[in-house]
Amino acid sequence: MAARKKKRRSQSTEDKFVWMLVAAGSAMLAAMVVERGMTAGWRAVTAEDPPAKPESLDTGWGDALLWTAGSALAVGLGQVLARRGAAAGWEHYKGKLPPI
């Protein structure tokens, strides 16, 4: 009997899928950590909870703008750092840069 060759997905397609999961997971984890840090920092500085709904008319403009800008900046930076860290880990493990 002749051995049949099994069809396998190409390694690059598999790598792309795995990288997509790793990058998304690291970015989501970073966002959660940064959000908790931002909340703790806000409470430490103001002795109040951060605005739950910055768009609410009960929230002052200063608090709404400060919370929105600060959290957007912190989450964005956290995600970039997490993805770069994941890319460095990928390169160390695979010996090549992650697929795009």
Image (cartoon, rainbow, N blue to C red):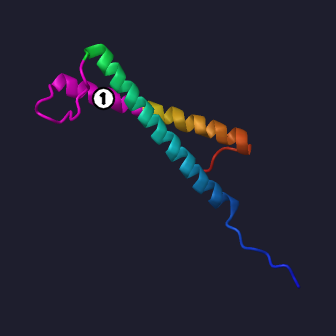
Look at the image and tell me whether residue 100 can be seen. no
Q: Is residue 52 magenta?
A: yes
On the image, the x and y values in percent for residue 37 come to: 40, 25
Q: Which residue is mark 1?
A: 69
**Residue located farthest toward the left when viewing the structure as drawn:** 57
Are there few (<14), some (14-19), or many (20+) residues within 10 Å of tag 1?
Answer: few
* Amino acid type assigned to the residue bearing label 1 in the image: Ala
| Residue 50 lies in quadrant | top left
> Which residue appears at 85% of the width and 79% of the height?
3
> Which residue appears at 66% of the width and 58% of the height?
12
On the image, the x and y values in percent for residue 22 come to: 57, 46
> Which residue appears at 63% of the width and 60% of the height?
13
- Against 5, residue 76 (above or below) is above
Q: Is residue 24 magenta?
A: no
On the image, the x and y values in percent for residue 27 come to: 48, 40
| Residue 36 lies in quadrant | top left
